[in-house]
Amino acid sequence: MCQESWSTSLQIKSLGLFSNAYALLILATLGWGCNAVAGKLATSGWEPFTLTFSRWLLVALVLLPFAWTHVQRDSKLIAKHWLFFLLFCGSLMALFNLLMYLALNHTTAINVSIEQASMPLFIILANFLVFSQRVSALQIVGVCLSIFGVLVTSTNGEPLKILENGLNRGDSIMLVGCFFYAVYTFALRWKPDVHWLTFIFLIAIGATLISFPFSMFEFFRVSMSMPSGSDWLILIFVVLVPSIICQLCFARGVELIGGNRAGLFINLVPLFGSLLAVLIIGEQFQWFHAVGLVMVVGGIMLAERFARTD
């Protein structure tokens, strides 16, 4: 993203906050940490597939007047790469959200927050499998540590029980969702050079189209009631904060300090998500959550550290 595009589309750049990469990246990860809590709160009034469809439809409508000029300017690239934007990225984003909101009906927001930290693990494995990227001994240690941390979290501190009972339904669903989001992140290296507003708008359109049949299936198969006022406020929050404001803050943070340094801040998402789950919805933070969180985040940081220095 060029400096000119930001100055013409965002007049608030003159504010000190918008030039502070660290504050922006912390705000972005804080908002993404809130997403699991908001999703848990939404389980009482929204069905997961309907929530996903409504979220991305509203994101597309909110962004339309701001993104349309850039969409027109990027029309040639969109026509050439529409499968990448709408079907690939849009479907992966939709599937991640569908599965996350579904998982929150069967597990805690703390578990979902910590398990999101497994995404870099999938990306490291993809780099190894697709690009034959060299893996050092310490990278392998980091990957194994992260895997064990996920097991500790999802088995309530008794990882050997997975041999008898497997993972519970919610945690299994969430890990599949994390895999889809990791594939989306991995694929961003091939993203055509379009404006960031164009990109988010096209993802919103794609995610809306992909989630629509899921929501229709849910509509005809599940007895649904009209969401309350607080349920609509939760929907507005997930539309404005995790979907738009956090994307803006993270994109600006990447512009200021680069993708490698900004990417490390993603490790704050499970920290913020776990803390907010305790403070806002009163979930209990157990010892195995702490152990799992340290293992997952520490293992990923170890693996990423030695991936860069090999």
Image (spheres, grey):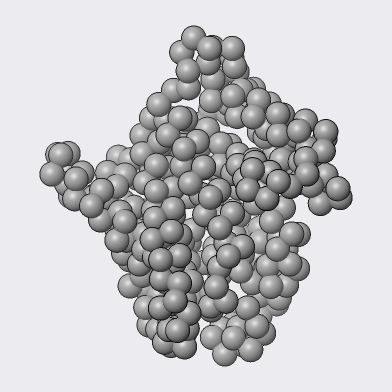
Q: Residue at x 32, y 61 (%)?
A: 208
Measuring from the top left, give residue 96's x and y in whole percent.
44, 47
Measuring from the top left, give residue 64's x and y in whole percent.
37, 78
Q: Residue at x 52, y 54 (%)?
A: 184
Q: Residue at x 71, y 76 (%)?
A: 19
Left or right: 308, with 283 as reference point: right
Measuring from the top left, give residue 188's x and y in whole percent.
57, 61
Measuring from the top left, give residue 48's x and y in whole percent.
31, 44
Badge count: 0
Left or right: 9, with 201 as reference point: right
Farthest residue in the top direction? 164
In this view of the protein, can residue 67 be seen by the observer?
no
Q: Nearer the viewer, residue 227 or 48?
A: 48
Q: Residue at x 57, y 76 (%)?
A: 193
Left or right: 10, with 97 as reference point: right
- Which quarter of the picture shows residue 129? top right
Quadrant of the image containing the N terminus: bottom right
Q: Is residue 26 above or below residue 82?
A: above
Q: Is residue 251 above or below residue 293?
A: below
In this view of the protein, can residue 80 be seen by the observer?
yes
Q: Nearer the viewer, residue 291 or 130?
A: 130
Left or right: 303, with 105 as reference point: right
